[in-house]
Amino acid sequence: MAQTIDIANPTRTQAILNEYGLRAKKKFGQNFLTDLNVLHNIVETAEITAEDYVIEIGPGIGALTEQLARSAKKVLAFEIDSQMVEVLADTLKPYDNVKVIENDVLKVDLAKVISEEFGDNAHVKIVANLPYYITTPILIQLLRSNINWDNIVVMMQREVADRLNAAVGTKSYGVLTLTIQYFAQATLAVKVPASSFNPSPNVDSAVVKLTPLKPTTVVENVGKLFGVIKGSFSHRRKSLWNNMLQTYGKDAGTKEQLTVALKSAQIDPAIRAERLNLEQFTQLYLALRDQNLTQ
């Protein structure tokens, strides 16, 4: 089934780029991975088996897709670049277990697509070499979407990877960190130098594995919980109180409600959001909800 020469082989990658007159498009954050060892590590990290259904985001010319197809039952790849979709029709021709969908993964109903393409109760794994400029929105959407997944293995900018497990009070700690903590356990699997790509980006990358977790405190509306968290971080250098006034209002009645909520959650109004852990944010959300302030 496999091609004689892997798509990720540097010589073949360049030949494909030349054949189609391709150049990495900055607007899509494209860099073509040409390190087979890294690709094999990604597949091994995701523990892909013949029973697994895989969703890939941003397949490019198909280097990772090819490796996934050799191990998985079926691969569903979302590609936003119409030119790449045409290339993939050629490079992935030997693999009948791959389907490419030309669409922005942020605009699709993943739960519906998974049900239609994989059926119910499928073992779904999500694998991607994420464009740097859109890593955070994609991760947050994947985690907050109503889908069941066995693991998520994604390559991202090393700086973003460091934010996933950032400690409370550090510069890297923020909304993304808390989103990860609520839904998953993050493990740094592979460090990837810039030299593994064509063209080489200006930064190093990392492969991260996310394993699903059950939240310590389950809330009935996760979107509203993270609305509270996002508002609290709207201006990192401002106090929690000032950010809450900006979010909820500055009239006397609202100030009184906020004061009651903060006291109930046992949180100092003068603290900055970066000093609060997930459990404290959860208690703050519940207290704000009781004051009818959550948006």
Image (cartoon, rainbow, N blue to C red):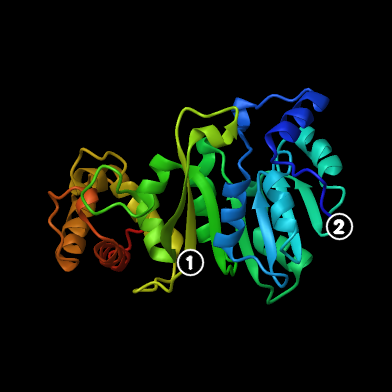
List x then y, in percent, for residue 276: 22, 56
Whole-percent x, y for residue 247 in the image: 31, 46
In terms of depth relative to the viewer, which is nearer, 268 or 275? 275
Spot occupied by residue 87 in the image (x, y as percentages of width and height) = 81, 36
Indicate the amino acid at tag 1: Thr
Amino acid type, residue under disc 2 in the picture: Asp
Image x and y of residue 261, in percent: 21, 63
Q: Residue at 86% across / 57% down in the picture?
A: 96
Residue drawn at x 20%, y 39% is: 238
Q: Which residue does the image show at 73% across and 70% down from the upper left? A: 50
Residue neighbourhood size for the residue with mark 1, other residues' Cα within 10 Å, grouped as few (<14), some (14–19), many (≥20): some
- Disc 2 to disc 1, how far (Cα)? 29 Å
Which callout, 2 or 1, points at the residue further toward the start of the chain? 2
Q: How many marks?
A: 2
The numbered mark at residue 198 is none
Please tell me whether mark 1 sits on a helix, a strand or a loop. Answer: strand
Q: Residue furthest bottom?
A: 121
Residue 158 quadrant: top left
Q: Which residue is mark 1?
A: 211
Looking at the figure, which quarter contains the C terminus?
A: bottom left
Q: Which residue is depicted at the point 57% across and 69% down?
A: 150
Q: Does residue 77 appear in the picture of this structure?
A: no
Q: Which residue is mark 2?
A: 96
Of helix, strand and loop, which one carries label 2? loop
Q: Nearer the viewer, residue 206 or 149?
A: 206
Q: Nearer the viewer, mark 2 or mark 1?
A: 2
Q: Is residue 56 visible?
A: yes
Instruction: Give left or right: position of 265 versus 2.
Output: left
